[in-house]
């Protein structure tokens, strides 16, 4: 990991020397069903007119790492270029029977489970290539899960700047204060990717995040 | 009570008793191991359907390696669905100045104050964690 940290550091210095419009690799990480793809879709639709991937209520809909390059975001007269990297949800267990509960056939459920496990491995491997990461959490769920802590711990160890997003603030059970209390050292923004709530504050935080990258 | 009735009652009681094996792993058992060997040791215990309570915690990259290796096994090892994992790390929040100094000194001398709990998903439904406690919910 030390070699990878040094490699990323050299890459950032090098691209800073040749000041062009460098694309910032912005990763979307988090547990399954938190709304990573919904948020990535919102951003891509706002700035490129096209979405990045499909969404679903069934967990592990995103099972491959998905990209959208040349996403140019304008905010208060400033412009930044991003490569949006949407990753599969990271989980420590995957059971095909959980998909059967959504009335999926056993054969399709097993296939989905197999793809989801590979997706988790791919998401972890892509961590090293991120310049900045948005960790998307479901604000209606317990933020203290070990998966969330592991993801953020790894980003800190790799010196990758982090923005924590508490999604689904439109829901009654949403508790953004609990997310803020769980991660007091990090910038936490509450949004609803589905309804586009609080996106102004979100973009402001993304620009702050990009400055650290 | 007739013998048949007693035998039936014993059978009923036997059905309700289910065991759970908890294996405690002291830090000294994993201290000298490489990251790969640590993860292999933990996963071997988990595959025996045991709950692991480990003194200390894995490093951040070891935790992700554990998740990667777990995912590689799901679907290839019979009845293995993954793991549930939680780390209790009391830290030095809320301590006085001297409390924090003692805490820092103990840490520097190698005290392993955190506790890592890992269980197979086949028997552990969920490990719920909040700042001060952990709840382990078992499957029926």
Image (cartoon, rainbow, N blue to C red):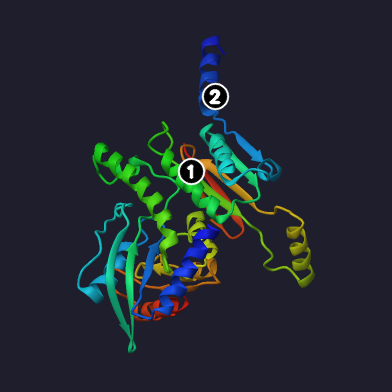
Q: Secondary structure at mark 2?
A: helix
Left/right placement of residue B35 relative to residue B79 reads right
Residue contact at pointers 1 and 2, CB within 8 angstroms? no
Q: Is residue B29 visible?
A: yes
Image location (x, y in percent) of residue B88: 61, 54
Quadrant of the drawing holding the N terminus of chain B: top right
Left/right placement of residue A39 relative to residue A13 reads left
- Looking at the image, which residue is at 30% across and 55% down? A62
Identify the subunit bearing mark 2. B
Q: Residue furthest left?
A: A49
- Looking at the image, which residue is at 53% across and 41% down? B119
- Looking at the image, which residue is at 73% across and 68% down? B95
Residue that mark 2 sits on: B13
Neighbor class of circle 1 (other Cα within 10 Å; few <14, some 14-19, many 20+) is many
In this view, A146 is above or below A133: above
Image location (x, y in percent) of residue A19: 38, 81
User: Disc 1 or 2, which lies upstream in sequence?
Assistant: 2
Q: Is residue A149 visible?
A: no
Image location (x, y in percent) of residue B130: 56, 58
- Say which of A105 and B16 sits in front: A105
Identify the subunit bearing mark 1. B
In this view, A152 is above or below A101: below
- Say which of A47 and A172 sits in front: A47
Residue that mark 1 sits on: B83
Both labels 1 and 2 in a single chain: yes
Image location (x, y in percent) of residue A63: 31, 52
């Amino acid at each position: 990991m030390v070699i990878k940290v040094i490699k990323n550091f050299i890459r950032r210095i090098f691209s800073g020397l040749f000041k062009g419009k460098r694309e910032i690799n912005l990763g979307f990480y988090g547990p399954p069903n938190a709304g990573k793809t919904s948020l990535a879709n919102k951003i891509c639709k706002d700035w490129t007119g096209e979405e990045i991937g499909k969404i679903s209520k069934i967990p592990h809909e995103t099972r491959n790492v998905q990209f959208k390059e040349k996403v140019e975001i304008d905010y208060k007269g400033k412009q930044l270029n991003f490569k949006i990297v949407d990753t599969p949800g990271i989980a420590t267990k995957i059971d095909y029977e959980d998909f059967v509960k959504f009335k999926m056939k056993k054969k399709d459920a097993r296939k989905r489970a197999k793809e989801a496990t590979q997706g988790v491995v791919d998401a972890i491997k892509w961590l090293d290539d991120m310049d900045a990461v948005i960790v998307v959490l479901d604000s209606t769920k317990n933020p203290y899960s070990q998966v969330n802590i592991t993801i953020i711990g790894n980003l800190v160890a790799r010196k990758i700047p982090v923005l924590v997003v508490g999604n689904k603030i439109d829901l009654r059970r949403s508790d953004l204060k609990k997310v803020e209390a769980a991660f007091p050292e990090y910038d936490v923004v509450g949004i609803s990717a589905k309804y586009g709530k609080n996106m102004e504050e979100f973009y402001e935080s993304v620009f702050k995040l990009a400055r650290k990258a | 009570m007739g013998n048949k009735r007693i035998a039936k009652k014993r059978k009923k009681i036997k059905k309700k008793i289910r065991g759970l094996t908890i294996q405690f792993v002291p830090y000294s058992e994993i201290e000298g191991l490489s990251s790969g060997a640590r993860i292999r040791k933990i996963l071997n215990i988990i595959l025996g359907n045991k709950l692991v309570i480990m003194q200390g915690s894995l490093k951040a990259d070891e935790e992700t390696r554990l998740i990667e290796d777990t995912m590689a096994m799901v679907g290839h090892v019979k009845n293995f669905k993954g793991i549930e994992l939680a780390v209790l790390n009391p830290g030095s929040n809320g301590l006085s100045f001297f409390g924090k100094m003692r805490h820092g000194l103990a840490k520097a001398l190698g005290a392993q104050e955190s506790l890592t709990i890992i269980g197979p998903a086949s028997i552990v439904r969920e490990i719920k964690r909040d700042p001060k406690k952990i709840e382990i919910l078992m499957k029926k």
